[in-house]
Amino acid sequence: MIKVGIAAYGITPFTKDDQKIESVLLKSVKKLFENNPKINKNDIDAVLVSTNNNSKYLAPILSEMIGIQPKIAHSIESLCNSGTNSIVSAYSYIVSGLVDMILINGAERYDSPGQILEWDDSRGEFKHPIFWASIFTKSYKREFSITDEQLAIVSVKNHKQAKENPNALSKKTFTIQDVMNSKKLTDDLRLLDCSRPCTGGASILLASEETTKKITDIPIWITGIGQKTTSAAFTKNMSFSSMESSKIAGYAALKMANQNIQDIDVAELHDAFSVCEPMALESLGFSDLGNGTSIIKELYETNDFKINPRGGLIGSGHPLGATGIAQTIEITQQLQSNADTRQVDNANVGLVHNMSAAATSSTVLILEK
Amino acid sequence: MSFESELIKGTFCIPECTICKKIVWPPVEFCSNCFGTVSLKKGDFKGKIIEFSRQNKEYFCIIEFENTIKIMAKISQMPEIGQTVKISKCGIVNGNYFFYVN
Ligand SMILES: [Zn+2]
């Protein structure tokens, strides 16, 4: 089968800035070209824009702004995992032979409409994500006898790691007590347990094997893809203490890559809220059920950046459409040994876990040197 | 008669396929199993509390009906897992469904 490589990337700081979506789109692409002067932009066959923004026709607009006339240009939306959905679509375009080189751009504003799934009336008046997160947290704590303090380590670790990420929204570190004392949103969720919506952009260029090797000396390959959608409605989840779609997607991605979970050296997990990190660790098989927080505590205490090295969504901020692409860029940098003070030792195989709407849909990617 | 026209009047119905009898939730016009027409079952449905949390003084919980469909609803007293409840009030405000149970 045709190999698909990550040939280039560009990312800008995540902020609370009020920027036009077109400006957010353009900035990370500009960075991508500045980082990689060898790219002839006229060789780009397709442009995909990953966003929940309500503006229309953004991929043709971006193409015009950067002076190219691609064959294919369109947007992709799937709430919080729009980014990896775009990467999967781009991969398929290359493998099919329709295109050779494809630009994927994720962009979101802090006021993204993608935060609320209006359609899901089964949630009644509780449509804000803090309510599903509270139910997940309560259910996880009940099922595995976990305390709020044990979960707070996720936020402590990820803010600490974000401090090494120059593009992260958070610039501060916090203690367990800080997390416990932060504003109580519900009985089971505090402000510092939450990722924050923000403005941010991230771009990635995928290409066929031959073209990737012409652009970069340190190509990273997408070797595994798994996706699963179990429902759209939050209340359809069979369990509120584990992630069924992530489990299935993870299994499929590892199988395609011919890897085991023990072979993963570094991973980006979708920690939209603190509880999501141990749940993802467990559902993907990094940990036994109920043991995720012990692993996170150990990683924190040993200063091991294996899980969410850029600070996760909690530390980096969560510009929905850009998140999956930013996660993929982080794993690419890790595998290229380009992650500066966030670098994980001997990173050869990496994993990206990106999900939407209370884990009703998940994408898992495996990347390799 | 639609689910929403009944809900606006304060009546909670369970949407069920006229052909294969599958419960269709959240409500949709046609059955997700066989595309059959969906009709509304009326009744004094009993639900079971699956999970809950609290915002300020208000409890919100996940209730399961007929061992199949789940909704998020408010409850005034401290809930218990497994507790049997009934819908005491429901409707639509500003386009959002709301449910109270006790
Ligand atoms: Zn039917």
Image (spheres, helix red, strand yellow):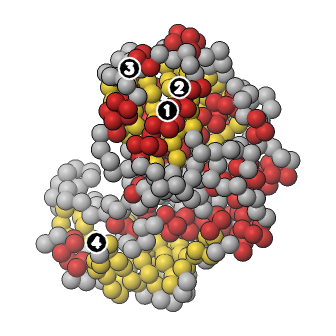
Tell me the chain of label 1: A
Q: Return the residue found at the far right.
A: A302
Residue B41 visible somewhere in the drawing: no
Front: mark 4 or 2 = 2
Do the residues indicated by labels 4 and 3 lie within the same chain of the protein?
no
Q: Secondary structure at mark 2?
A: helix
Seen from the viewer's position, the closer of residues B93 and A212 is: A212
Q: Secondary structure at mark 4?
A: loop
Residue at 47% over, 16% down:
A40
Residue receiving disc 2: A33
Kindly report the distance in space between the C-alpha atoms of the residues bearing marks 4 and 2: 45 Å
Kindly report the distance in space between the C-alpha atoms of the residues bearing marks 4 and 1: 39 Å
Task: Tell me the quarter of the picture where residue A257 sits.
Answer: top right
Residue receiving disc 1: A29
- Tag shown at residue A45: 3
Seen from the viewer's position, the closer of residues A7 and B64 is: A7
Front: mark 4 or 1 = 1
